[in-house]
């Protein structure tokens, strides 16, 4: 580990030298790339330098042990330096873990009502509201791509994009089946019903990220409309893309321009095809994949929201919180942080095997 850290620090110093060179500022592209590299390496290098400082303090303390008057102070300094090194070493191991190349990407979230009819559709809308409020807390931007609404205010399915720094890193563990247990408003007997909603979180891909053959894509245009014929467009600006090799269908109807809808639909299609390929690759190495946090596959039940008890349980890590109202209002940080910590712990374990 120390050899790797020394090499990274040397690279960081080299970048600093390059950034100070006058010729670098004559090349905006190079300057931008170097600044980005420096920003990515900075947390690791700064932690490593603090670790080196703690090592120096321990060595200085050892040199003072031979002095009887200084020995108690030296022993205290050595102990503090060792404890700091242990803590910093744990931080360094986490920082050295390979970074998911998609962590900084925007995300496309697709929510579909599952078992439960109208009740599932109503909860699908509740999840959309929850993620929208969480995005607002994170100062991210949310845009709806398409929605299939119901008369009672639910959604059979909804696709939306969340734009913001680190969006995929914090949202990616939301993929899977979300189960809700509550008494529907239409239930006169007060019985608790169980419904399910499927969530898929995809890193937003550009057309250049995924090989798309134009001949494989059929484009259809139509007029967009909401539930009950509301918000009807007088022009055919909504776009439907059909990927012939896979049969995958993508619709986008929220923008007024056909071009904008097509652009969004192409990104959604690229993201779905990327995810499909990743799932195929993952299935080939299932035995080697981490199991604590789960694979994030769409058919995996990951969480239960129990309204009568005000309880949320994430089944992957055994986390139960009795603050359902706060969670549904976008207070997801405690859940997200716990899932990320569990994922890091599992990856650390794999690194040591």
Image: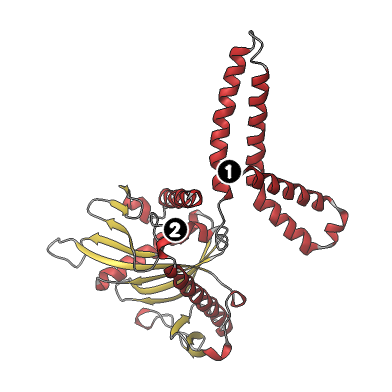
Question: In the picture provided, is 136 more to the left or to the right than 51?
Answer: left
Helix, strand or loop at mark 1:
helix
Label 2, residues with CA under 10 Å away: few <14, some 14-19, many ≥20: many
Kindly identify the residue that appears in the image at 57 percent across and 19 percent down: 76
Residue 233 lies, with reference to residue 55, above or below; the image says below
Distance (Cα) linking label 1 and label 2? 33 Å
Q: Identify the disc placed on residue 133.
A: 2
- Where is residue 160 shown, x and y percent of the image? 47, 70
Residue 288 lies, with reference to residue 1, above or below; the image says below
User: In this figure, what is the number of numbered marks?
Assistant: 2
Label 1, residues with CA under 10 Å away: few <14, some 14-19, many ≥20: many
- Where is residue 115 shown, x and y percent of the image? 26, 71
Q: Identify the disc placed on residue 92.
A: 1
Sequence-wise, which precedes: disc 1 or disc 2? 1
Foreground pick, 149 / 263: 263
Kindly identify the residue that appears in the image at 70 percent across and 48 percent down: 7
Q: Residue furthest left?
A: 189
Kindly identify the residue that appears in the image at 63 percent across and 46 percent down: 44
Q: Nearer the viewer, mark 1 or mark 2?
A: 1
């Amino acid at each position: 580990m120390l050899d790797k850290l020394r090499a990274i620090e040397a690279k960081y110093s080299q970048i600093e030298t390059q950034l100070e060179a006058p010729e670098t500022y004559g090349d905006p592209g190079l300057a931008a790339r170097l600044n980005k590299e420096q920003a990515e390496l900075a947390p690791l290098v700064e932690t490593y330098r603090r670790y080196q400082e703690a090592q120096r303090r321990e060595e200085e303390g050892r040199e003072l042990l031979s002095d009887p008057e200084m020995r108690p102070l030296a022993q205290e300094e050595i102990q503090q330096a060792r404890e700091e090194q242990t803590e910093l070493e744990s931080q360094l191991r986490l920082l050295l873990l390979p970074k998911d190349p998609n962590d900084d990407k925007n995300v496309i979230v697709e929510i579909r009502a599952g078992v439960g009819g109208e009740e599932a559709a109503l909860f699908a809308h509740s999840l959309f509201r929850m993620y929208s409020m969480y995005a607002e807390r994170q100062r991210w931007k949310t845009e709806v791509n398409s929605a299939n609404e119901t008369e009672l205010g639910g959604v059979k399915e909804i696709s939306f994009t969340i734009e913001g720094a680190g969006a995929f890193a914090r949202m990616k563990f939301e993929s899977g089946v979300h189960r809700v247990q509550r008494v529907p408003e239409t239930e006169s007997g007060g019985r608790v019903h169980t419904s399910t909603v499927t969530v898929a979180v995809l890193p937003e891909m550009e057309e250049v990220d995924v090989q798309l053959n134009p001949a494989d894509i059929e484009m259809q245009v139509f007029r967009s409309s909401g539930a009950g014929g509301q918000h009807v467009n007088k022009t055919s600006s909504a776009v439907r893309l059909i990927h012939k090799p896979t049969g995958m269908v993508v619709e986008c109807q929220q923008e007024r321009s056909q071009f904008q809808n097509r652009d969004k639909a192409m990104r959604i299609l690229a993201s779905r095809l990327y995810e499909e390929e990743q799932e195929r690759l993952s299935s080939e190495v299932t035995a080697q994949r981490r199991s604590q946090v789960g694979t994030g596959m769409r058919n995996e039940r990951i969480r239960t929201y129990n309204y009568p008890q005000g309880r949320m349980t994430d089944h992957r890590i055994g986390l139960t919180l009795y603050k359902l109202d706060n969670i549904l209002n976008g207070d997801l940080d405690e859940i997200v942080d716990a899932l990320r910590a569990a994922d890091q712990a599992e990856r650390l374990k794999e690194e040591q095997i």
